[in-house]
């Protein structure tokens, strides 16, 4: 029984080497590492009008920054539901893309507070962006005197979309402007045999509808107060809002929890639904899909409240190609880039120097409204609340969608506000 | 006791005779060295990292920023008593429903298939292969098709399986599948049952094939009927197989993540702890995510550790 | 087998109950009556239909074009057969398809080698505390990987492993050690006659030489089982992939989820993608499956 210790040591060494070499084998496969020309742009714009907008921006980028190569890092899913998860994972892996899409406002501050994105204040000066954007927007992008992202657009979230034919067939000639009128219209549709008077999707789209109802019941100022601690979540007016929202749910499709916003949109396009609440990216998406028979107006009872959100792009810490990223950001903030993007995306340009006549009908109306309306923020789209808050709210809406527990929803929303609102 | 394990025992007995300490070291030393890289890797990457996660779970690192204050069991207490909407308890309840449906369904189908095949059916190989093939498919891929099959629309909007029910005039069977607030998780188990029943069948077939023919022959001589044969002779022989199957299915079920992410995405109705961890990490709440992970680990450990100890004992005895 | 997050011990994973191999018995007892046989076959066929139903949907839908996928005619054959969806899926999955081979093949080979070395040692050399060590190794197989994932991500960054495939190879190899060790340990305890090793010892062959020249050549069936096992778990894994890689450097499950998890997924392309993502593991099953099942059965046969 003679065992060579040397052999055993060698064996151990080989085992380790195997693991090591195996790990080295795949080294050549990392496509992200080799090309310094690449600018990977991370968005959730993968389909329809959103994709068209991104494509417009990319063609402008290819002109302005021909020394760099655009790499599409889009992860589909409405409101970035999937993309934000992937992004969080990548940032935690230290694998930041060269730039990513982030909603202006509280959501952006998540990344700033975590030290994940770079200060762009000096670039703002160099590119003359400080005066190009409206002051209110600049304020919501600024943290401690520094600006961290370049906004591409302004969207409006509280828009009700209609199928004109469905409404006309039911004898509805004017789009309701108050909640009671809205319920009447929905009842009419139901009586006329429209399967789904109001089309709806899953958690974050439910939250959008709910917020629109809250704006109607609370008014713009009190609604904004919900997110900055000035309005209580436990008030009777919020209870009223939840009850109204619960009543609205009875007019919606039962399989809403399996739907993204585009599935709900499809119900409108196929004349199976009369109404849908969605942000104004729907205008571009309907155009891109060739559906013309749609109408739009502010959500009933919202009056002149303009629930805004802005997509912006950032320079992540540790981006592999910061020069390329900066060129992208410059394109995003530039007049030509904003035009190429927003004419297709359904949003209005964040810049104040845009010419309305360059834009489709919907955006022309929106640009006029934006100048005069009262801005209110949106939670699912990051202008009102942080990602942690969004997660808690989405989860609470998911629960409410399945059990309709009014007191439970109010308690959960109040708890979420207490946990996540800035102290 | 079989021939080979009998031999093993006698060899071990032989080895034990007359060996000095030095001889023993010489004997197992090289083997231990060969084993050591793996042992070190596992010590670090299994036990070391579990310890790290445990440390995170008792800290107050609720953002991406470093903060390592020690808060004791607060994160755990919060999970059970102070989570918004009792979200964690809800995820545990979902997990329980999923686990029961998944284990029962997989076990029953697997046993039935094994029973149908165990007596040597013509074309057994083909049947076996077809029943087993879903196991080769990833949960992500099967989620694609099951998401389509479990379309929750009904009536004119019916799709997937509901459509078939409708066409067969079985409209009353149409249901909302995983979107059902109470039993949705049982529907979520269907793809998993589809994927793993064949595996359970293979395990039981192996079990049946392992039962010595003499036992059946003896039962025949004793005049046992089919029911008695299975009930009193064959099934008792399969108890260890059944135990293993339960352990395997149970721990798989508790870790279920891919399938749910693929069918429904992360959302309230279908949230289980493994998905909740992911959702919590999204907002960089490391401490809470770690606490959920450790609870999940403990749940698995409660089932697995006794089983491993039991096996270790059985082995030592043999 | 279906994913690494659910690494499952094959039937050999019944420590303590392994024993000699037996040829499958086909007892004369209870031969089914003709009626009984008819019922058996009828049941088997019904189950086949149920099991194949999702496969039918996958294949049929993948050859439909976008507008063919309405509510009506969902279950019927395509009105117009087209490979457009396959093209679309291939464009989305192609790069990650190649990467997944770079992941799964090294994982299968390295894990199997490690497993066979460990299994050989643990089945033959009973050092003090071997049982405890073995039990501790086994536990690594059952842990929910969430319990290690958060620090694991930091550790691989700290030691500088390139993100994506290299990191995933490392993770799958490490966390695949328990299952491969178990399979080989049971295999060697069951199959390899002790006399062979004893004879080698008398010859004075060293441990490594015994292993390389005597054990490895007779380990093919064990290798088939672990290679299939590790290949499929690495191929099908989603949990490690989503934590340790991304769409630009990760395996096919990530790309498939990005394709299929989209808003209003293109079901035709998603299903073509699901088929593309499943083909390699299915082929492995079809080509090696006979030995795989044989190996599973041989290893788990109980006295």
Image (tube, coloured by chain):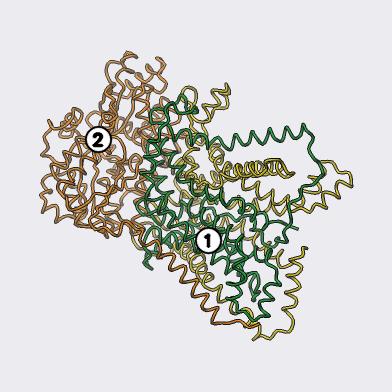
Chain colours: A orange, B yellow, C green
Q: Position of residue C269 (x, y in %)?
A: 40, 38
- Which mark is nearer the camera, 2 or 1? 1
Q: In this view, does A195 lie to the left or right of A128?
A: right
Is A140 above or below relative to B14?
Answer: above
| Mark drawn on residue A152 | none
In-image side of B231 versus A319 (left or right)? right
Q: Residue A156 carries which label?
A: 2
Q: Looking at the picture, does residue A284 appear above or below residue A389?
A: above
Q: Is mark 2 on a helix, strand or loop?
A: strand
Viewer-side residue, C298 vs B115? C298
Q: Position of residue B29 (x, y in %)?
A: 60, 80
Where is residue A108? Give x, y as percent.
Answer: 27, 49
Query: Which of the chains bears the disc numbered 2?
Result: A
Question: In whole angstroms, how far apart are the C-alphas of marks 2 and 1?
Answer: 50 Å
Q: Name the residue under label 1.
A: C176
Residue B142 in picture, x, y percent from top left: 50, 42
User: Which of the two residues, B74 or A47, is positioned nearer the viewer here?
Assistant: A47
Q: Is label 2 on the same chain as label 1? A: no
Chain letter of disc 1 in the image = C
Return the residue nearer the eye: B177 or C220: C220
The local crowd at label 2, few if under 14, some if 14 to 19, many if 20 or more residues have their Cα within 10 Å, is many
Residue B71 in view = no
Secondary element under disc 1, as helix, strand or loop, is: helix
| Total count of labels | 2
């Amino acid at each position: 029984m003679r065992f060579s210790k040397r052999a055993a040591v060698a064996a151990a060494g080989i085992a380790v080497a195997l693991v090591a070499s195996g790990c080295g084998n795949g080294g050549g496969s990392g496509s992200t590492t080799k090309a310094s020309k690449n600018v990977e742009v991370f968005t959730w714009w993968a389909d329809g009008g959103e994709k068209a907008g991104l494509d417009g921006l990319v063609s402008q980028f290819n002109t302005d920054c021909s020394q760099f190569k655009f790499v599409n890092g889009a992860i589909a899913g409405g409101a970035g539901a999937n993309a934000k998860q992937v992004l969080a994972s990548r940032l935690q892996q230290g694998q930041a893309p060269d730039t990513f899409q982030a909603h202006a406002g509280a959501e952006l501050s998540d990344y700033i507070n975590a030290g994940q994105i770079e200060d762009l204040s000096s670039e703002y000066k160099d590119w003359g962006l400080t005066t190009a954007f409206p002051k209110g927007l600049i304020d919501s992008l600024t943290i401690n005197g520094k600006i961290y992202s370049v906004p591409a657009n302004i969207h409006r979230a509280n828009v009700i979309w209609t199928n004109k034919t469905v409404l006309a067939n039911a004898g509805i000639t004017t789009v309701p402007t108050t909640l009671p009128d809205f319920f009447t219209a929905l009842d009419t549709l139901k009586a006329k045999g429209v399967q789904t008077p109001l089309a709806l999707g899953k958690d974050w789209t439910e939250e959008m509808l709910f917020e629109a109802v809250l704006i109607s019941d609370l008014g713009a100022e009190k609604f904004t107060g919900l997110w900055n601690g000035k309005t209580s979540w436990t008030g009777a007016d919020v209870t009223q809002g939840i009850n109204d929202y619960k009543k609205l749910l009875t007019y919606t499709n039962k399989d809403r929890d399996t739907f993204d916003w585009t599935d709900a949109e499809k119900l409108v396009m196929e004349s199976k639904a009369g109404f849908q609440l969605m942000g104004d990216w729907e205008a571009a998406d309907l155009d891109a899909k060739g559906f013309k028979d749609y109408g739009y107006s502010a959500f009933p009872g919202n009056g002149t409240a303009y629930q805004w959100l802005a997509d912006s792009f950032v320079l992540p810490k540790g981006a592999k190609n910061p020069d390329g990223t900066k060129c992208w950001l410059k394109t995003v903030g530039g007049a030509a880039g904003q035009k190429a993007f927003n004419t297709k995306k359904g949003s209005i340009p964040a810049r104040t120097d845009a010419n309305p006549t360059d834009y489709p009908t919907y955006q022309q109306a929106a640009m006029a409204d934006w100048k005069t309306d009262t801005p209110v923020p949106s939670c699912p789209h990051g202008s009102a609340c942080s990602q942690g808050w969004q997660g808690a709210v989405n989860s609470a809406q998911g629960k409410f969608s399945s059990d309709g527990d009014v007191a439970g929803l109010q308690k959960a929303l109040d708890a979420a506000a207490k946990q996540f609102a800035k102290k | 006791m079989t021939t080979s394990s009998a031999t093993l025992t006698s060899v071990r007995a032989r080895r034990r005779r007359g060996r000095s300490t030095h001889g023993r070291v010489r004997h197992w030393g090289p083997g231990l060295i060969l084993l050591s890289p793996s042992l070190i890797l596992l010590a670090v990457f299994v036990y070391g990292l579990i310890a790290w996660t445990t440390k995170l779970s008792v800290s107050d690192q609720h953002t991406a920023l470093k903060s390592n204050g020690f808060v004791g069991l607060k994160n755990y207490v919060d999970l059970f008593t102070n989570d918004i909407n009792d979200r964690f308890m809800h995820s545990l309840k979902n997990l329980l429903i999923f686990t029961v449906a998944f284990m029962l369904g997989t076990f029953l189908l697997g046993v039935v298939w094994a029973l149908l095949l165990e007596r040597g059916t013509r074309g057994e190989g083909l049947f076996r292969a077809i029943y087993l093939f879903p196991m080769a498919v990833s949960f992500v891929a099967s989620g694609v098709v099951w998401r389509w099959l479990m379309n929750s629309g009904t009536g004119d909007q019916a799709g997937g399986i509901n459509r078939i029910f409708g066409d067969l005039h079985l409209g009353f069977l149409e249901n909302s599948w995983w979107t059902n607030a109470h039993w949705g998780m049982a529907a979520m188990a269907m793809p998993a049952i589809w994927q793993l029943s064949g595996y359970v069948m293979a395990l039981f077939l192996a079990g049946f094939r392992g039962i010595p023919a003499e036992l059946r022959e003896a039962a025949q001589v004793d005049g046992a009927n089919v029911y008695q044969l299975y009930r009193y002779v064959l099934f008792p022989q399969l108890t260890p197989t059944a135990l293993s199957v339960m352990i395997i299915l149970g721990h798989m079920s508790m870790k279920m993540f891919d399938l749910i992410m693929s069918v429904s995405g992360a959302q309230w109705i279908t949230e289980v702890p493994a998905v909740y961890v992911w959702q919590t990490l999204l907002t960089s709440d490391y401490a809470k995510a770690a606490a959920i992970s450790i609870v999940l680990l403990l749940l698995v450990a409660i089932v697995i550790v006794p089983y491993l100890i039991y096996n270790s004992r059985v082995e030592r005895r043999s | 087998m279906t994913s690494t997050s659910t690494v499952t011990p094959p039937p050999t994973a019944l420590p303590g109950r392994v024993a000699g191999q037996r040829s499958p018995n086909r007892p004369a007892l209870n031969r089914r009556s003709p009626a009984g046989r008819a019922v058996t076959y009828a049941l088997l066929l019904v189950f086949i239909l149920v099991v194949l139903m999702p496969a039918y949907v996958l294949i049929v839908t993948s050859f439909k074009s976008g507008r063919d996928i309405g509510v009506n005619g969902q279950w019927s054959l395509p009105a117009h057969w087209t490979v457009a969806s396959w093209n679309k899926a291939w464009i989305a999955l192609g790069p990650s398809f190649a990467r997944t081979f770079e992941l799964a093949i090294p994982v299968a080979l390295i894990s199997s080698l490690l497993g066979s070395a460990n299994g050989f040692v643990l089945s033959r050399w009973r050092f003090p505390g071997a049982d405890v060590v073995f039990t501790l190794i086994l536990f690594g197989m059952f842990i929910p990987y969430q319990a290690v994932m958060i620090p694991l991500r930091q550790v691989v960054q700290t030691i500088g492993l390139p993100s994506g495939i290299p990191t995933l190879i490392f993770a799958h190899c490490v966390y695949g050690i328990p299952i491969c060790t178990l399979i080989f340990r049971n295999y060697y305890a069951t199959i390899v006659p002790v006399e062979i090793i004893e004879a080698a010892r008398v010859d004075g062959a060293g441990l490594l030489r015994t292993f390389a020249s005597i054990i490895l050549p007779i380990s093919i069936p064990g290798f088939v089982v672990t290679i299939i096992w590790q290949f499929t778990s690495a191929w099908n894994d989603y949990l490690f992939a989503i934590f340790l890689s991304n769409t630009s450097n990760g395996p096919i499950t990530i790309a498939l989820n990005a394709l299929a998890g989209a808003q209003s997924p293109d079901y035709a392309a998603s299903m073509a993608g699901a088929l593309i993502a499943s083909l390699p593991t299915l082929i492995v099953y079809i080509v090696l499956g006979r030995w795989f099942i044989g190996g599973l059965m041989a290893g788990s046969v109980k006295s």
